[in-house]
Amino acid sequence: MASKETGLEENTDKTLTMVTSRDQNAGRSLSMKTDNSSFEMAEEFKYLGTILTDKNSVQEEIKSRLKSGNACNYSVQNLLSSSLLSKNLKVNIFTNIILPVVLCGCETWLLTLREERRLRVFETRVLRRIFGSRRDEVTGEWGKLQNEELNDLYSSTNIVRVLKSRKMRWAGHMARMGERRGLYKALVGKPEEKRPFGRPRHRWEDNIKVDNQEAGCGDMDWIEVAQDRDSWRALVNAVMNLGIP
């Protein structure tokens, strides 16, 4: 249960409840009452700054974070376009002010290629404002920088690699928590019911395994590797430094 929101803005006068299920009709006919209070069923609401949905999807949360990042980018666009500031200072504004707004809580995100592209598009848009346009040496015409040129100018790690390294760091932290902690139980626990028909959904842990494979450790049990802090830290750094086309 959580505070009811209008347009996902908090309203503490009423309460909501939500059922997470693959069945689209689950919970629609369910009503909850206690004493003189009743709880309205909701498909999504914001709790502790994060959008939760009955489909257990992070797509809406990522959309919300990108929207907040665009608003933050708009609020500092005069600084990013100013000729009085150096490119390094503008990059620092991006990495220390805009990027944290977008990646808040990203450790729990389930990334797909579509979401990765959305994040890269957002990053490219901001970097084009920072580095401006280029002049063609032959024609003398001004045009926008291509992605390859932006990658050469932007020496910091791109947004997807930053996100993946944060997820890896958090995964290692959970793997070392021990069997008594609830997060560890949720990580290694196996549902008792049979899996429904169809292709299994991509899981958060699958993201971690794919990142391990990209770093050259795909055949190893990542939970065991994470017990050694130094080895896991080296793996996190390897994931961050991998290039993305």
Image (cartoon, rainbow, N blue to C red):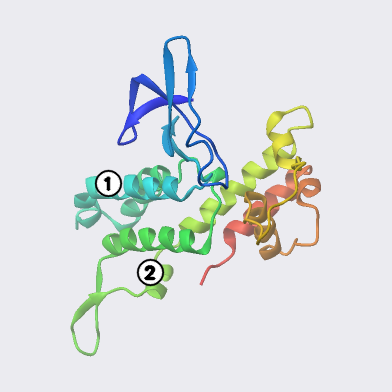
> In whole angstroms, how far apart are the C-alphas of marks 1 and 2?
22 Å
Of the numbered discs 1 and 2, the one sitting upstream in the chain is 1
Judged from the image, the secondary structure of the residue bearing numbered disc 1 is: helix
In this rendering, would 204 be left or right of 127? right
What residue is shown at x 49% (from left), y 25% (from top)? 1
How many C-alpha atoms fall within 10 Å of the one at disc 1: few (<14), some, or many (≥20)? some
Give the residue at x 36% y 43%: 97
Q: Position of residue 115 (x, y in %)?
A: 47, 58
- Nearer to us in this view, 121 or 52: 52
Residue type (three-letter) at the residue carrying disc 1: Ala
Say whether residue 120 is visible: yes
**Badge 2: residue crowd in 10 Å (few <14, some 14–19, many ≥20):** some
Place residue 125 in its image quadrant: bottom left
Q: Nearer the viewer, residue 61 or 212?
A: 61
Q: Are marks 1 and 2 in contact (CB under 8 Å)?
A: no
Residue 149 position in % (x across, y down): 38, 74
Determine which of the numbered discs, if any, sits on residue 71 in the image.
Answer: 1
| Viewer-proximal residue among 222 and 7 | 7
132 left or right of 59 in image? left
Most extreme residue toward the top is 35
Compared to residue 164, the image places residue 243 above or below, namely below
Q: x and y percent of residue 32 in the render? A: 49, 22
Nearer mark to the viewer, of 1 and 2: 1
